[in-house]
Structures are given as structure tokens and as C-alpha cells.
Amino acid sequence: MAENTGSLRHTVAMNVTPDEKRRNDALAERIASVLHDIRVEKEFTQDQLAVRAGLSRTSLGDVEQARKAVTAQKLLQILSALDVTMSDFFRRVEQSEQM
């Protein structure tokens, strides 16, 4: 049976409190910022990283600007292309929260 993920997302979004939304938005911003910082540190352009990760430049840009939520699969593709482990990445995200 096919799942209607659009409705599921809508239902989940309706059950999020304003505080949860603010925390989720802040986390998305930190994830985007850390991804951008790592890309720049590794001296990749968005185009170069997008090709290495198998994504469009637009898709990568949306992730880096927190315009769209990043899926686990897409995050893994990007981190693999950057040669960064998931644990190292989230350690940096956590550290960015404390700054």
C-alpha cells in the first residue's frame, strides 16, 4: 500500500509546538551553516561538491541555505563527498550550538 507522505508531513507539522518549530529551525540553520563551513574549508565550490555528491547545485544550495530540509540520504551523500563522518559532522553541529 502506498503511503501518502504529503499528508503525513502535514499531520506532523500540525502537531509541532511553536517552541519545537523554533528548535527545529535553529537546528536546520546550524546543519546548513556547518555544511557550508566544511565545504569552504575543503575548498570546494558548490558546483564541485554537488557533482561529487551526485546532487544538483540547486539542491546543494537549498541545503546550505536551509531553504529545504536535508534528508538523511542526501546528508550522507554530501558528507561522503566531503570525506567527513556523520559523527564528526554532528559533533561540529553540537559545538556550533554552544558558541
Image (cartoon, rainbow, N blue to C red):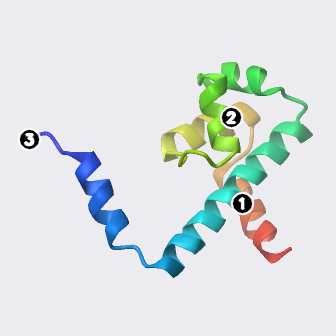
| Quadrant into which the C terminus falls | bottom right
Is 23 rendered above or below residue 85?
Answer: below
Q: Which mark is residue 66?
A: none
Q: Secondary structure at mark 3?
A: loop
Where residue 97 appears, as percent x and y from the top left, is 76, 72
Q: Nearer the viewer, mark 3 or mark 1?
A: 1
Residue for badge 3:
1
Query: Which tag, 3 or 1, sits closer to the chain's start?
Result: 3
Where residue 24 appears, as percent x and y from the top left, is 55, 67
Q: Nearer the viewer, mark 2 or mark 3?
A: 2
| Amino acid type indicated by mark 3 | Met
Instruction: Choose between 14 and 79: the one closer to the eye.
Output: 14
Residue for badge 2:
61
Is 54 rendered above or below residue 41?
Answer: above
Q: Would you say 56 lies left or right of 95 here?
A: left
Query: Which tag, 1 or 2, sits closer to the chain's start?
Result: 1
Within-10-Å neighbours for mark 1: few <14, some 14–19, many 20+? many
Q: Would you say 85 lies left or right of 38 here?
A: left
The answer to the question of whether label 2 and label 3 lie on touching residues, with beta carbons closer than 8 A, is: no
**In percent of the image, x 64 and y 49: which residue is there?**
66
Q: Would you say 90 lies left or right of 43 here?
A: left
**In percent of the image, x 65 and y 67: which residue is there?**
26
Residue for badge 1:
30
**In percent of the image, x 33 and y 73: which residue is there?**
15
Instruction: Choose between 57 and 77: the one closer to the eye.
Output: 57
Query: Which tag, 2 or 3, sits closer to the chain's start?
Result: 3
- Number of numbered callouts drawn: 3
Quadrant of residue 58 within the rendered picture: top right
Q: Secondary structure at mark 1?
A: helix
Q: Would you say 4 lies left or right of 28 here?
A: left
Q: CA distance from mark 3 to mark 1?
A: 36 Å
